[in-house]
Amino acid sequence: MNYSQIMGIPVPKITMEETVEIIDQVITEKKAELFHVVTLNPEITMSCQHDSQLRSIIDEAGHITADGAGIVMVSRLKGNPLPERVTGCDLLIHLLEMGNRNHWSFYLLGASEMTSSKAAEEINSRYPNISLMGRQHGFFEEKDESRMVEEIAALSPDVLVVALGAPKAEFWIHKFKSRLNVRVAIGVGGSLDVIAG
Ligand code: UDP
C-alpha cells in the first residue's frame, strides 16, 4: 500500500470504496483480532505531535483514513496527494449500506441517550437487514466500563461504532481491544448525531 505522510503519520492513499472493501474483507475473514479503524482528523494529527500514547495507538491501528479536507489538502501541498477524504460520518454511512447488503451486525456506543436511541431507530428503519445488537450512550462512568465491555463481547458484533468524540474513542477502543470480541471498531465523532437528525 502507498502512503502519504501527514505530519509524520502514514495515511494510506486509498479511496472510500477501497476502505470499505478492506473492512468487508476483515469482517468476512472473521479474524480474532480487533481491527481498529482511525479516522484521522486535524485534531488527532496535532495531538499526536506531543501525545506519544495517542501516537502509538494510531501506529498500532489496523487502518487510518483521511478525515477531512484539511488532511487531503496537506497531502496535496506536499506533492503526495491522498485520493479523497474518508470522513467518519461518510464511512459509517457506507458501512451501514454494505452491512445492509451483507447482513452485518452493529453495536452503537456513544452520544447522548436521546441521540443514541433516535440513531438506532433510524438505522433499523433505513437498513432493515442490519442486526443492531445493542447500544449504550456515551456518558457512562469508569465503573460501568467492565459491564459494558462484557455486554459487547457477549454480543460479538461485526462493527463497534464508537461515537465518544476524538481522541476519546481512540483511547477507549485501544484500552479494551483485547476484550471486546468485535471484528471492527471505529471512532466516528458526531456521526450518530447526524444520523439521528
Ligand atoms: N460524546 C460522548 N461522550 C463523551 C463526550 C462526547 O458520547 O464523554 C459524544 C457526543 O455526544 C457526540 C460525539 O461524542 O455525539 C462526538 O462529539 P464531537 O462532535 O465533539 O466529536 P468529534 O467529531 O470532534 O470527534
Image (tube, rainbow, N blue to C red):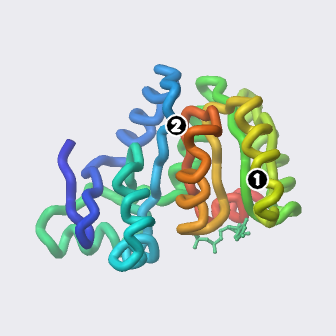
For the image, the number of numbered tags is 2
- The residue shown at (45%, 76%) is 43
User: Of 13 and 108, which appears nearest the observer?
Assistant: 108
Give residue 113's position: percent from left, percent from top: 86, 61
As shown in the figure, which amino acid type bears the numbered disc 2?
Leu
Q: Residue furthest left?
A: 79
Which of the two labelled residues, at mark 1 and mark 2, occupies the earlier sequence position? Answer: 2
Which residue is disc 2 drawn over? Answer: 34
As shown in the figure, which amino acid type bears the numbered disc 1?
Glu
- The residue shown at (38%, 53%) is 64
Label ID, residue 145 = 1
User: Of 56 and 10, which appears nearest the observer?
Assistant: 56
Cβ atoms at labels 1 and 2 below 8 Å apart? no
Give the alpha-carbon distance from disc 1 to disc 2, as whole Å.
Answer: 18 Å
- Disc 1 is placed on an element classified as helix
- The residue shown at (29%, 56%) is 11
Find ligand 1 in the image and state its quadrant.
bottom right
Q: Is residue 6 left or right of residue 63?
A: left
Give residue 63's position: percent from left, percent from top: 39, 47
Quarter-wise, where is residue 154 in the image? top right
Question: How busy is the neighbourhood of tag 2: few (under 14 within 10 Å), some, or many (20 plus)?
Answer: many
Above or below for 83 versus 130: below
Above or below for 25 versus 43: above
Quadrant of the rendering where the C terminus is positioned = bottom right
Looking at the rendered image, the disc whose residue lies closer to the viewer, 1 or 2, is: 1
Give residue 86's position: percent from left, percent from top: 42, 56
